[in-house]
Image (cartoon, helix red, strand yellow):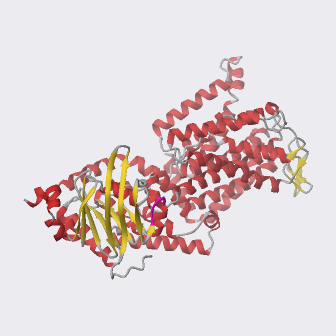
Amino acid sequence: MTPAPEPRPDLLRVEAVCKRFGGLSALEDVSLAVREGEIYGLIGPNGAGKTTLFNCMTGLYDLTQGRILFQGADLARRKPHEIVALGFARTFQNIRLFANMTALENVMVGRHPRSRAGVLGAVLRGPRTRTEERDIRDRAKALMQFVGLTRRGDTLASHLSYGDQRRLEIARALATEPRLLALDEPVAGMNPSERRQMSELFLRLRDTGITLLLIEHDVKLVMGLCDRVAVLDHGRRIAEGTPVEVRRDPAVVEAYLGVEAA
Amino acid sequence: MVARLLTPLNRYFRARPWLAFALLAVFLAVLPFIVGAGFGRGWVRVLDFVLLYIILAIGLNIVVGYAGLLDLGYIAFYALGAYLFAWLGSPHFGLHLPFWVILPLGALLAGLFGVLLGAPTLRLRGDYLAIVTLGFGEIIRIFLNNLNAPVNITNGPQGINLIDPIRLGDFSLGSTQAVFGITLYSPYLYYYLFLAFTLATVFIAMRLQDSRIGRAWAAIREDEVAAAAMGVNTRNVKLLAFAMGAMFGGVAGGLFASFQGFISPESFHLLESIMILCMIVLGGMGHIPGVILGAVLLTVLPEALRHLGDWQRAWLGEVVVDPSDLRMLLFGFALVLMMIYRPAGLIPSRQRKRELAAEDGVAEQEQASLYDTRA
């Protein structure tokens, strides 16, 4: 917990992070800060290092240098499941659902870090386990409803449409009760009306008090939705600020928005 | 055709579960007598082995079917349970502990070795894991084969003899007993003991599958990275799968040792591991009724095919093809047919069935959604 003096404390701080794969430098001295309660956008061209940064944050990669703080706690050497337990959940760019489980079961897995039953509990199924199971199921159903998949609970995840799979991934991540939800290109491959529905979902999420960290290619969507934005290019953070500030930043215009702004 | 006959029956019993349970209980209770009267007492022994293999198959199913970890060395845990029983309950070391001490110890020992096997293989999957576990199984067997010098621990290839039967007070399952005026031979007595263990195994496996732990196993089977991202401690949950599976193997091993009275490394060959894996695959991976059916078929069929020699002698006057060769040939043939016509197993789980049946439908749906996104 950060006893921060400012009204909106930093939930996530990335401090001078470097990540190298052998000789290849994927992230160079990247720093940024996500504040409690905002929608924070991370944009940049292909290969800029956005997903690499995500993987560093969520424990899939070790950092070469620098540190990442979540609610003041250093995430270095923490395993992905520990980071989720701290309240930092994510989705994946290439959807990674549990394909042969039903949609509802997928979300129920997300309750894992917030439930306790072990082998003995599972075998004996005493009152506490039964209550817990009922709670897991009820919450999973409520989340399915929240993302708009009310009637798809018994469908296998792999049988859902593409857009529904994206929604299911969000519901599953929400089941872990995150304070910060990181979404890796959540509207990639969606048509305009699906995109609108998703942006509306993000706003509803922010209203429930969840901070969102968004990787997105769609600059228009990011600029319209995000409170603040960081721009990555060739592994460096070239700008951070409100969408208006970033849009005016000459480095951004040159590196990324050049075509778009012209 | 069969399905048409079974559907009304199925519906009838679904509406009356207690009746189905009662009938099943009566059936299981009188089964050894039916088998004994119909086929001879030797077949009651086969029936006992069927139950042991059901325990083994359900145990391995936890590792392979639930958690998706391909384990080809499973028989090693069976061996450990069996040898522990032999060490603690035979003249070999002069120890004669009661079975209710040895069996839990056997489960613990096997579970411990399950973790020992699991720990170094945490990063491996699929084929690679299969190779390491196969090696593990062989290492255990070779140790058992050679640990007779300088200190005689396992008595080497001769194995350990005169293992205590399961005994409670003066009531020994190893000898003929009269219960309520009914004369029960040893295999009959063991049948009821093994039945109790089998039912417990089924119960535990079903409860585990439908729980937080079972979902975590399934999640790891489906996508380990995503499972970790959902807060599943993949290391612990995998080790738990190895340990749980191994414990069932250890208990079955102990039961086997006391039932047989004699064990040697011969009984714990790689082929046994593969056989148990085949039971799971044949019956329907991850689905308990399927696994049970697989275990029944693959234990009974080889025994039945043993009689091929007798039939040949009766009809042809001499044994033309050695039945044991033919047995394996037919066995392999059956498995190939299975993979072609019922790849999900004889009684596939609900999910596996949908998964395989709906493949065409999914392809179409994927096409459609791709098309949608371009709009």
Instruction: Tell me: B139 left or right of B260.
Output: left
At horizontal 81% and vertical 56% (from top left) the residue drawn is B100
Residues shaded magenta: A74-79
Instruction: Tell me: B67 left or right of B45.
Output: left
Whether residue A172 is visible to the viewer of this picture, yes or no, is no
Image coordinates of residue A71 in percent, x first then y, are 42, 72
Tell me where residue A177 sits by quadrant.
Answer: bottom left
The chief SS type of the magenta part is loop
Instruction: Tell me: B320 left or right of A133.
Output: right
Image coordinates of residue A41 in percent, x first then y, are 26, 66
At horizontal 41% and vertical 60% (from top left) the residue drawn is A58
Name the image quarter holding the C terminus of chain A: bottom left
**Magenta segment: does it hold A75?**
yes
* Residue farthest along the left direction in this orientation: A262
In the image, A80 versus A49, the foreground residue is: A49
Q: Is residue B276 above or below residue B167?
A: above
